[in-house]
Image (cartoon, helix red, strand yellow):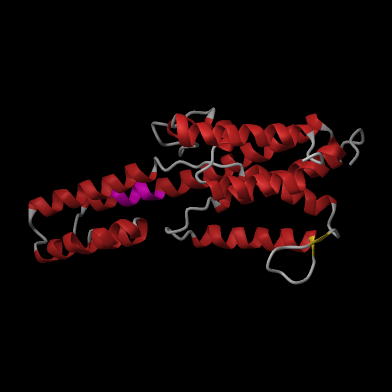
Amino acid sequence: MLAITPTVRNLLILNILFYFIDSSVFNLSSDFALRPVVSPNFHIFQFVSYMFLHGSIGHIFSNMFGLIMFGPLLERIWGAKKFLIFYFVTGIGAGLLFSGIGLYENWHLAQAVELYTQNPTPDGFADFLSKHAEAYYESRLQFVNDFEVNPTNSMYIQQSIRDVRDVYVATINVPMVGASGAIFGILMAFGLLFPNTELFLLFVPFPIKAKYFVAFYGLFELYSGIQNAQSDNVAHFAHIGGMLFAYILLRYWGTQKSNFY
């Protein structure tokens, strides 16, 4: 614990404190998690507040472990102020990229909802759910089958339209929490500044240079984000956003002769 630098220590305490309050005292996530920008529950301050909330013990543990492992060295090199700026820029940047991609995806979802409501059919309903709400589709198999048997029944038609609209409302209110964007930014910075540092990872029997580890992790997150599996609750594009903004900020700092790291 003596090796933890002051800013890293304060961030660690704040994250643990807010996790305890959120999970045991008061539901902070309902107001302070980052909502999609089209959600009526979206607020601009959520681009900052979401970074201090976590969904589970495992979630906060993995993020704080990354902060403790890679953050102190960066703070010693940059100083507390510069490190804190970096942390918030990458965290907010992660939220911005995630929200931008979410806005694009939700626009397409809204288009699909509009198309279905104009022409509600059993096949169209099954296709919509399989593409946009696979988990929900499995729970509505009986209704899908009944709708196919009664394709002109107004009751089934209206219920299918309500279901499709419910999927849209639920999707645009899914929150995002976690410091992962900032942590991935820190990881990116470590890989860029100390590329040949060898890391010893759990379950890997040989050391891996930081530059290869960061490159592999970045490509994995990009692949996972593009795959966009509905059963995957990880905000991969937020991780990519943290790494991207870290790269941009480091390149900008590198052009400033008054900065040294």
Task: Report the quarter where the C terminus lies.
Answer: top right
Residue placed furthest toward the front: 1
Query: Was residue 14 drawn as part of the magenta stretch in this picture?
Result: no
> Whole-percent x and y of residue 40?
38, 31
> Whole-percent x and y of residue 259?
89, 35
Residue 89 left/right relative to 189:
left
Residue bounds of the magenta highlight: 108-114
Q: Residue at x 55, y 50 (%)?
A: 58
Query: Was residue 109 drawn as part of the magenta stretch in this picture?
Result: yes
> Whole-percent x and y of residue 98?
54, 45
Comparing 146 with 63, the one in front is 63
Q: Residue at x 92, y 36 (%)?
A: 257
Residue 242 left/right relative to 145:
right
Q: Is residue 145 visible?
A: yes
In which image quadrant can residue 127 be found?
Answer: bottom left
Residue 259 left/right relative to 163:
right
In which image quadrant can residue 168 be found?
Answer: top left
- Tell me: residue 252, above or below residue 193: above
Residue placed furthest toward the bottom: 205
Q: Is residue 244 visible?
A: no
Task: Report the quarter where the N terminus lies.
Answer: top right
Residue 223 left/right relative to 150:
right
The rendered magenta stretch, by its main secondary structure, is classed as helix
- Tell me: residue 227, above or below residue 162: below
